[in-house]
Image (cartoon, rainbow, N blue to C red):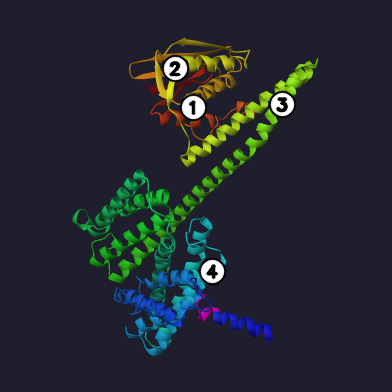
């Protein structure tokens, strides 16, 4: 062996047996005493959680379907490092030796369980799995690779050790192997994700709506767990197909609370299920205890895998949405500075060419200024969209004369569209309190859309009506209209009605979404009435 190889091996062994340097100062390693205490605590936890499992419907006395230590071991190695492996070996040996396994078999089982934890952790580390388990890649690495392969190692070595020691007959080895493998897999799919996802503190929930939803969700999980797995026999036959009742709270957890909520819901329901099955009052209460637990754990394995995948996909989508919003906000901010400079220089050139006889140059500069203003509005919309997503969209409170605001918006846009005649019918009589600039933004969006989507029409009518409690503004065009199937989607972000005009008409599909958020901020309502081929009427009402 070369000197470099011996040095690398020495460093590797040193990394296994010692903690890294202390974080609170000093240059030496963490005292070995703390390492020993950590091993003893993990051994005690392993032993304390393993003994009850070996008393629940075991196959051949040692293969159990409720084996909590596997999930705890992998989470411990993943978070604390490979150096904790002696605790797994010692804990497994003790729990099996005191259960009645011969010395040789107890040692073999200890080696198998240790290799299981090491292999599972190594696979997760190799695949760069994060403790948050917030991506589909992370969950698939655990569900499809790490858990089944590592459990196979433990089950094979454990059953082989018992068979060689004369504790298991060959005829019963297959059933014991299946129970052993399934018990380890369900532990890896329930406890490992639970411990990993809850090892990171994400901060308290501050939203009152979020707290209310969390309370309702917790109550739902408890009620369904009690009814489905502990009290069901009082209401209906045990054979009734009611296990589907477990899925609504799990789907709720995956979609709304991510991997952390999903893992907690899975563990709570699984705990109810195991207790109910042992007592004989759950839907899985037919046959011997071992058979009951076998079918239950098979059901929970599939349920856990499905729920974790759904939670990961949801979390991944939320993360992508956040990154997209951050990107749009950054790009919008970066574009505003050069665009402002470009607008200033364009106005300067207009003033200079105004003194000379250059109509073509003035016309070109006028087109430039129009496009710059259009781009400025687009960037402003993107910034507003980012602020809405972040909950930071600002509003000012002032007295607004809606009749005057509508008239000014109509006059301004009339100059940009000689083909359309914008008329105003009615009035609102009075004022309201709100943000005049934001109300103008809503009006400009509705009028601009009316112009864009009625190229063959000549009229656009603004209807103003009011009551003692509400004022209403409606923008009516006589253009292409919106299909009935599309009308419920047009206020969604980035949604545009399908059709030939989609390729020929500019837009990102964010204006109506922003307008709806502004109106809803003032407890108003924005809606559309449209007939395809005859035109559309967009209306909003605001309380006085």
Q: Report the residue marked by disc 3.
A: 346
Q: What secondary structure is marked by label 1?
A: helix
Earlier residue among tags 1 and 4: 4
Residues drawn in magenta: 15-21
Q: What secondary structure is marked by label 2?
A: strand
Circle 2 crowding by C-alpha within 10 Å: few under 14, some 14–19, many from 20: some
Spatial CA distance of label 3 from label 4 is 60 Å
Spatial CA distance of label 2 from label 3 is 34 Å
Label 1 or label 4, whichever lies nearer to me, is 1
Q: What secondary structure is marked by label 3?
A: helix
Q: Report the residue marked by disc 2.
A: 401
Earlier residue among tags 3 and 4: 4
Q: Report the residue marked by disc 1.
A: 438
Residue most extreme to the right: 357
Spatial CA distance of label 1 from label 2 is 13 Å
Residue depicted at x 40% and y 21%? 432
State if disc 1 and disc 3 touch (CB < 8 Å). no
Circle 4 crowding by C-alpha within 10 Å: few under 14, some 14–19, many from 20: some
- Residue 521, position as x, y percentages in the image: 41, 31
Circle 1 crowding by C-alpha within 10 Å: few under 14, some 14–19, many from 20: some
Earlier residue among tags 2 and 3: 3
Q: Report the residue marked by disc 4.
A: 123
């Amino acid at each position: 062996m070369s000197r470099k190889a011996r040095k690398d091996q020495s460093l590797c062994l040193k990394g296994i047996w010692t903690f890294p340097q202390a974080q609170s100062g000093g240059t030496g390693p963490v005292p070995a005493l703390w390492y020993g205490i950590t091993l003893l605590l993990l051994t005690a936890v392993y032993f304390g959680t393993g003994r009850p499992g070996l008393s629940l419907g075991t196959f051949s006395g040692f293969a159990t379907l409720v084996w909590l230590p596997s999930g705890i071991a992998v989470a411990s190695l993943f978070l604390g490092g490979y150096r904790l492996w002696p605790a797994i070996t010692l804990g497994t040996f003790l729990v099996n030796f005191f259960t009645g396994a011969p010395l040789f078999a107890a040692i073999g089982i200890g080696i198998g369980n240790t290799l299981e934890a090491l292999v599972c952790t190594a696979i997760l580390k190799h695949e760069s799995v994060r403790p948050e388990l917030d991506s589909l890649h992370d969950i698939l690495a655990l569900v499809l690779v790490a858990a089944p392969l590592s459990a196979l190692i433990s089950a094979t070595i454990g059953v082989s050790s018992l068979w060689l020691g004369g504790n298991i007959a060959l005829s019963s080895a297959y059933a014991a192997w299946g129970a052993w493998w399934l018990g380890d897999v369900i532990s890896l799919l329930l406890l490992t994700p639970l411990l990993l996802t809850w090892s990171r503190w994400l901060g308290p929930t501050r939203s009152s709506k979020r707290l209310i939803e969390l309370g309702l969700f917790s109550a739902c999980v408890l009620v369904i767990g009690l009814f489905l797995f502990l009290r069901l026999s009082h209401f209906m036959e045990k054979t009734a197909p009611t296990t589907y009742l477990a899925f609504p709270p799990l789907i709720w957890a995956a979609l709304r609370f991510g991997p952390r909520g999903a893992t907690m819901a899975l563990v709570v329901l699984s705990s109810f299920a195991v207790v109910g099955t042992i007592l004989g009052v759950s839907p899985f209460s037919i046959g011997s205890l071992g058979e009951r637990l076998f079918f239950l754990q098979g059901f929970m394995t599939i349920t856990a895998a499905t729920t974790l995948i759904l939670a990961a996909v949801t979390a991944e989508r939320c993360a992508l949405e956040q990154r997209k919003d951050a990107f749009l906000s950054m790009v919008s901010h970066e574009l505003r500075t050069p665009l402002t400079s470009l607008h200033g220089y364009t106005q300067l050139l207009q003033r200079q060419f105004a003194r000379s006889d250059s109509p073509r140059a003035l016309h070109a500069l006028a087109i430039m200024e129009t496009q710059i203003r259009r781009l400025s509005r687009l960037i402003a919309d993107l910034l507003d969209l980012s602020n809405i997503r972040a909950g930071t969209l600002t509003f000012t409170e002032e007295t607004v004369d809606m009749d005057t605001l509508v008239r000014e918006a109509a006059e301004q846009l009339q100059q940009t569209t000689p083909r359309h005649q914008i008329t105003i019918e009615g009035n609102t009589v009075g004022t309201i309190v709100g943000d005049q600039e934001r109300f103008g933004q809503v009006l400009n969006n509705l009028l601009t859309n009316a112009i864009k989507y009625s190229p063959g029409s000549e009229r656009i009518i603004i209807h103003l009506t009011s009551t003692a409690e509400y004022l209403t503004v409606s923008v009516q065009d006589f253009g292409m209209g919106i299909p009935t199937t599309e009308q419920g989607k047009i206020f969604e972000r980035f949604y545009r009605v399908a059709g030939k005009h989609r390729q020929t008409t500019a837009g990102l599909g964010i204006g109506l979404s922003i307008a709806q958020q502004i109106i809803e901020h003032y407890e108003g309502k924005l809606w559309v009435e449209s007939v395809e081929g005859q035109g559309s009427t967009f209306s909003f009402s605001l309380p006085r």
